[in-house]
């Protein structure tokens, strides 16, 4: 073997090779597993390609285990898969593909291993290792993929324009691999992406977003995001993001380029957390800026309310990108809305009530909000950054102090909406919400103490101002 495998992996591969030889088919390990072993990255699954019927081979291998392994298969795609000790193994019959321009779905016919390698996206993904008994472990590398792994470059087996036009998802994959593996994309390949960027429209949003999220999860997401931007792909599916780009100057006053600022913020957040959704919050934190940008005479550029506009844009963007419409989306929208709050506290005398309010609004997401907010400090002016970070530490201290004293983060006001509806015999309505908010705010502001009686008296007062009397 040209690669380092565990005993367990070797046992599995020898077993597959033996069965393949019995069935009289050629059989190879191929793709990501081979690539990652050569690079020395962890592997999580293996792809096997064989001449003839991949599903039959998978079943025959599964039968050699006692008890036999469960095989799931897709007849239409000619693929089969089983899990052995938590390790995923996928089988496919070697195929030859020819594409038509209007669809991503090729005409597929049975092919040789060479045909199959030729239909692979990149040379580094086309390396195959034979598993048959007579040449077990022999590397097949028709496009010098090994060389490309060593030099850290991504090339296509075919002319790149053909590879990308045949299956435009490969453009996303190209940038994703460059970002994940810290590989370089040669100019001719990158130019082919730029030329074929419009072809991305035939790819489903789910698959595009899947690759995009893999880029977001790399150690330094700005690298892949910048490649997406420069190639023009980003604008194809995420124009709101590229709208952040650019600097306008009026009366000699400019503002920062919010696209590059955002990339920096994502990198900063990524350095502190592996949470995909926190990275998404970093991506979207200033997304409301283009819509709120104004030039105020004698003052300069402002983006008033961009955090609230960004919060509103978040569900629309999640829908457009087919991201989950669930609590992850709410979490991102909430962080976008709150992203200025901790830093704005550093600009004023920090009152207990302002701290309490932030604790209450952020709740469980306070730590993430603080990471986002700290990541947002990106000025080129080192002194300014230092001053901000120092003030920021003060806010952190104060948050800790007030939380220890008042336990606001998981606090619920002593009177809730259900109480209000019962007391005033009201249906769920705007009035109920208004009374509830007024009571909560009064406690957070320290106007009334945090107990039921005080809240009750205050509530009766507020309600009577709205023409409401208790029914009980
Ligand atoms: P990872 O699993 O880390 O995403 P991978 O290289 O294993 O990387 P998969 O999507 O699992 O990627 O695909 C397995 C193999 O199938 C690839 O290595 C490649 O040879 C081939 N492949 C996958 N997608 C395409 C595609 N769109 N066009 C051509 N070949 C592809
Ligand atoms: Mg894989």
Image (cartoon, helix red, strand yellow):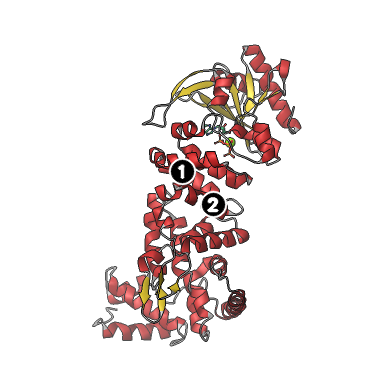
Tag of residue 230 = none
Q: Nearer the viewer, residue 469 or 346?
A: 346
Name the secondary structure under disc 1: helix
- Tell me where residue 242 sits by quadrant: bottom left
Please state, as top left, top right, bottom left or bottom right, where the C terminus lies in the image.
bottom left
Q: Residue at x 68, y 20 (%)?
A: 17
Estimate how packed mark 2 is, as few (under 14), some (14 to 19) or many (20 or more) residues with alpha carbons within 10 Å. many
Residue 136 spot, x, y in % from top left: 72, 21
Q: Is mark 1 within 8 Å of ligand 1?
A: no
Task: For residue 59, say whether it is visible.
Answer: no
Q: Residue at x 54, y 44 (%)?
A: 175
- Tell me where residue 394 sits by quadrant: bottom right
Whichever of labels 1 and 2 marks the residue nearer the N terminus, that label is: 1
Q: Is residue 298 above or below residue 117?
A: below
Please state, as top left, top right, bottom left or bottom right, where the N terminus lies in the image.
top right
Residue 243 spot, x, y in % from top left: 40, 58
Estimate how packed mark 1 is, as few (under 14), some (14 to 19) or many (20 or more) residues with alpha carbons within 10 Å. some
Ligand 1: image quarter: top right
Q: Is residue 298 above or below residue 249?
A: below
Residue 339 spot, x, y in % from top left: 48, 69
Q: Is residue 419 left or right of residue 413?
A: left
Q: Nearer the viewer, residue 79 or 83?
A: 79
Q: Is mark 2 within 8 Å of ligand 1?
A: no
Task: For residue 389, say whether it is visible.
Answer: yes
Tag of residue 216 = 2
Q: Residue at x 40, y 56 (%)?
A: 240
Q: Nearer the viewer, residue 386 or 15?
A: 386
Q: Which residue is mark 1?
A: 194
Q: Is residue 52 above or below residue 452?
A: above
């Amino acid at each position: 073997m040209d690669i380092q495998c565990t005993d367990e992996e070797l046992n599995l591969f020898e077993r597959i090779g033996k069965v393949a030889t019995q069935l009289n088919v050629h059989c190879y390990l191929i793709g990501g597993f081979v690539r990652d072993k050569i690079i020395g990255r962890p592997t999580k699954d293996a792809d096997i390609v064989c001449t003839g019927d991949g599903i039959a081979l998978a079943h025959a291998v599964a039968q050699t285990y006692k008890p036999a392994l469960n095989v799931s298969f897709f007849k239409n795609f000619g693929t089969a898969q089983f899990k052995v000790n938590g390790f995923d193994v996928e089988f496919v019959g070697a195929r030859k593909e020819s594409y038509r321009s209007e669809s991503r779905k090729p005409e597929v016919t049975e092919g040789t291993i060479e045909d199959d390698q030729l239909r692979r996206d990149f040379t580094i993904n086309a390396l195959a290792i034979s598993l048959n008994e007579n040449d077990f472990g022999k590397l097949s590398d028709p496009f010098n993929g090994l060389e490309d792994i060593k030099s850290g470059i991504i090339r296509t087996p075919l002319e790149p324009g053909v590879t990308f036009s045949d299956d435009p998802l490969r453009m996303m994959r190209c940038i994703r691999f460059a970002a994940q593996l810290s590989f370089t994309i040669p100019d001719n390949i990158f130019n082919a992406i730029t030329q074929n960027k419009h072809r991305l429209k035939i790819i489903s949003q789910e698959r595009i977003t899947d690759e995009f999220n893999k880029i977001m999860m790399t150690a330094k997401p700005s690298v892949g995001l910048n490649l997406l931007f420069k190639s023009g792909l980003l604008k194809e599916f995420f124009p709101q993001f590229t709208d952040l780009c650019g600097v306008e100057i009026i009366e000699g006053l400019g503002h920062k380029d919010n696209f590059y600022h955002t990339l920096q913020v994502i990198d900063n957040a990524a350095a502190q957390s592996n949470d995909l959704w926190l990275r998404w919050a970093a991506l979207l934190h200033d997304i409301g800026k283009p819509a709120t940008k104004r030039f105020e005479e004698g003052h300069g550029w402002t983006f008033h309310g961009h955090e609230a506009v960004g919060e509103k844009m978040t569900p629309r963007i999640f829908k457009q990108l087919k991201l989950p419409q669930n609590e992850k989306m709410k979490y991102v929208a909430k962080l976008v809305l709150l992203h200025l709050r901790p830093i704005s506290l550093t600009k004023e005398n920090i009152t207990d009530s302002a701290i309490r309010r932030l604790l209450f609004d952020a709740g469980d997401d306070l730590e993430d909000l603080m990471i986002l907010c700290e990541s947002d400090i990106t000025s080129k002016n080192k002194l300014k950054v230092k001053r901000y970070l120092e003030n920021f530490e003060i806010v952190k201290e104060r948050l800790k102090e007030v939380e220890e004293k008042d336990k606001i983060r998981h606090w619920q006001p002593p009177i809730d909406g259900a109480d209000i509806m019962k007391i005033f015999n009201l249906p769920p309505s705007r009035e109920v919400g208004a009374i509830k908010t007024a009571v909560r705010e009064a406690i957070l502001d320290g106007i009334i103490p945090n107990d039921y009686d005080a809240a009750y008296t205050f509530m009766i007062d507020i309600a009577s101002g709205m023409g409401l009397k208790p029914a009980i």
